[in-house]
Image (cartoon, rainbow, N blue to C red):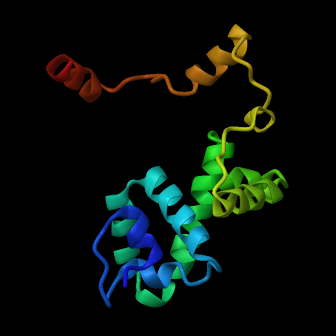
Amino acid sequence: MSCNGCRVLRKGCSDTCILRTCLQWIDSADSQGHATVFVAKFFGRAGLMSFISAVPENQRPALFQSLLFEAAGRTVNPVNGAVGLLWTGNWHVCQTAVETVLRGGALKPIPELLGGASGDDPDEASECTDMFRLRDPSPVSQKRRLFYG
């Protein structure tokens, strides 16, 4: 019989399924399916399977849980993700987001968590983009730009 993760991903399941052990910490079959679809949409199905197969079997449930929390945190707080929610004392928001996913609910970014930046203030926007500009490009990067565009 197919595990709930493989069932929702419409993937063949076997006795050596790597998803099955990842989902055992989630109580209901529906919640397992919701979590799998959410994480697979966020990281991609191939990415999810690659992450899982890269760690020892006994660590796979913890990895899946970590990926679920990061995907939920990054969805509600696109700039700082789950770590940002923890750092700012808003971990309860991430936990609530994960509970929402397990119930099959939808998530969207929470504007208050984006630092109140509305994008209307041009000074704020320039401060943000200045951070990503090259200050003093090296001759090597100038040559690469000539050759590669």
Q: Is residue 117 among the parts visible in the rendering?
A: yes
- Please tell me whether residue 110 is drawn above or below residue 85 in the rendered image: above
Q: How many marks?
A: 0
- x, y percentage for residue 21? 47, 85
| Residue lying furthest front | 1
| Residue 39, x across and y down, in percent | 50, 59
When asked about the image quadrant of residue 2, the answer is: bottom left
Q: Quadrant of the C terminus?
A: top left
Name above or below for residue 115 compared with residue 26: above
Residue 24 in which image quadrant: bottom right
Q: Is residue 60 visible?
A: no
Q: Residue at x 57, y 20 (%)?
A: 130
Q: Residue at x 42, y 79 (%)?
A: 3
Q: Quadrant of residue 144?
A: top left
Vertical placement of residue 79 versus 141, above or below:
below
Name the residue at 74% across, 19% down: 118
What is the quadrant of the N terminus in the image?
bottom left
Q: Is residue 144 left or right of residue 16?
A: left
* Residue drawn at x 18%, y 23% as measured from the top left: 148
Front in this rendered view, residue 71 or 130: 71
| Residue farthest to the left, as pictured | 147
Is 56 positioned to the left or the right of 14 in the image?
right
